[in-house]
Structures are given as C-alpha cells and as structure tokens.
Image (tube, grey):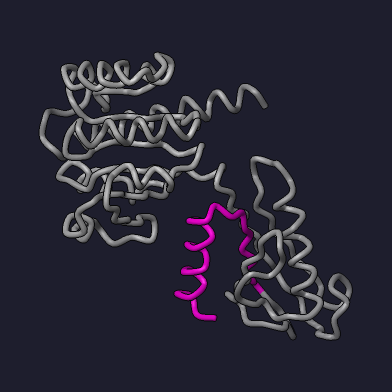
Amino acid sequence: MLYAELQSEIEKLQVANTPFCVATIVDGRGSIPQEVGAKAIFTTEGLHAGTIGGGRLEIKCRDKAAELLAANVSEPNFFARWNIQKDVNMTCGGEIAMYFEVFRPESEWNIVVFGAGHVSQKLCRFLIELECRILCIDTRQEWLDKLPKSERLEAHQVDHFEDGVERINPVDTVILMTMGHASDVPVLKKIHQTGMSLPFVGMIGSDSKARIVRKELQEDNLPDTFIDSIVCPIGDPEVGDNTPPEIAVSVVSQLLRMRQSCQADQSETV
C-alpha cells in the first residue's frame, strides 16, 4: 500500500476517533519478510491496512499492537529488535527492528476552530507548525479553500455553524471565530446540549461582546457554570495588538500556556 493510501487510512481513523497503532520496520539484517520502511496499521480489531510481511511476524506485531492499545501508559510507543527465527519462529534467517506508535484520541491535542475568516486564516497557519490536529469549520467553502494545505488541518463545510458541533470530542479545544455573536451563540447552545465538559471553549471578541453573549445565554436559561467557563475575549492580553496576525499570536500564546498548565497538572497526579 502506498504511503498516501496509508496516510488516508490514518486520517479516517483519526476522524472516527478510533485508537490505532502503526508498526514500522525501521531496520533489518539478513533475510526479512518485508523491506525497511514497510508499515501496517492495527486497531483493536486487528490488521486494518498495510503490511509488514504477513505470516507470523504480522501476528506478533498484531499482538504487540493490541497490548499497547490496551495499556494506559503515558509513553505508549515501543521499539523491539527481533531475531526472525528465535523470536518470531519463521524460517527467515534475519533480524528485524520494529517501531510501534500508538495513537489515541484522548492523547492528541485536537483543536476545533469555528470560522475560517481573517484571524482564523492566520491562526491555522501558526497551529499547523505545532504538534496538534486542527479542524476548521465554516459555512463558506471559498474561505475554507484559502486555508493552508497540511496533513494536520482538516477543512469542513457545514450549512450552519452549529452543525459542526457533532465533530467535537470531549477532549477537544474549541475556538469560536465566526462572523459574529449571532453565529457564535447557536454553537455554544449546541455544545451545552451535548453535555460535554470541554477543557477549553474560547470566543474571539471584546468585553462588550462577551456581555451580550452571556446575557443571551442566561435568557435561554443555560447554567452559570457553563456560561462562566466560556473564555472571551480569547487571547493572551499581554501579547499583540488588534490586527489579525497578532491576535492569532496572542491566541497561540494562550493555548500553549493552557496546554503547559494541563501537562503540569497531569504530572502532579501521576
């Protein structure tokens, strides 16, 4: 299977929030069942796509992938060097090095951006340089088409902004940058209806916009705990001016501070 086809399968699994493990042959000596660089994708159901040679090696890799997927550890990746005859019980006389990478939805930094306007265009260009995955949602295909092309960024067109809420997962960071509060509020209401407790919901705007949005949500009887959790205006107040590039920089600064704080909290509980 070609690399592009494997990458397509990986993206499908990520969109579906399916945990998976990629096994790669990173070194080989003597007779081995596949070439160095060959990959296979395993899910909890077994082999999903690709191949690292079939037979007993693939079964051994499948079992190791299943073990890693079942383990709840902070460093799920695994390196192994196996003798094909002694460790895998195959007739090939070589030695093989395997690297396993485990991907879980809850372990990745997923950012959902509602709106593909001027600030979002700058923000997404910064975010694709970081170790995260970005989903940008907009009703306007022409604005989505202006986004940078990256394996880390998915552009998704919807009829109404709130339709994109179905793509949110409980661990996602959510940023609202739509055309205004009239399109932000339905998204916030839909998020509340899901019952998810998201780690971060931020909305671009001003203090006056924040007051208007909170007033409308209160009038619709949304609980104060949810309303108070909404960060608006979004961005680091000590960074940047009011231009799209510098607003985007301030948002990235805030997100990095938030991630650092979360990582520190997690390390204290280990």
Give the residue displayed 19% in from the left and 17% down from the top. Answer: 207
Q: Is residue 101 left or right of residue 96?
A: left
Q: Nearer the viewer, residue 160 or 6?
A: 160
Q: Residue furthest front?
A: 220
Residue 119 spot, x, y in % from top left? 18, 41
Residue 34 spot, x, y in % from top left? 67, 82
Q: Is residue 232 left or right of residue 23?
A: left
The tally of labels here is 0
Give the residue displayed 50% in from the left and 27% down from the top. Answer: 262
Tell whether position 167 is magenta: no
Figure check: 46 above or below 76: below
In the rendered structure, which segment of residues is drawn in magenta? 1-27
Q: Is residue 72 left or right of residue 24?
A: right
Q: Is residue 244 left or right of residue 226?
A: left
Figure check: 138 above or below 269: below
Give the residue displayed 61% in from the left and 54% down from the top. Answer: 19
Residue 232 spot, x, y in % from top left? 27, 23
Q: Nearer the viewer, residue 154 or 126?
A: 154
Q: Which image quadrant for residue 172?
A: top left
Q: Can you say which quadrant of the picture contains the N terminus?
A: bottom right
Q: Nearer the viewer, residue 246 or 31?
A: 246
Give the residue displayed 74% in from the left and 67% down from the top. Answer: 61
Figure check: 200 above or below 228: below
Tell whether position 13 is magenta: yes
Residue 162 spot, x, y in % from top left? 32, 42
Q: Can you say which quadrant of the picture contains the C terminus?
A: top right
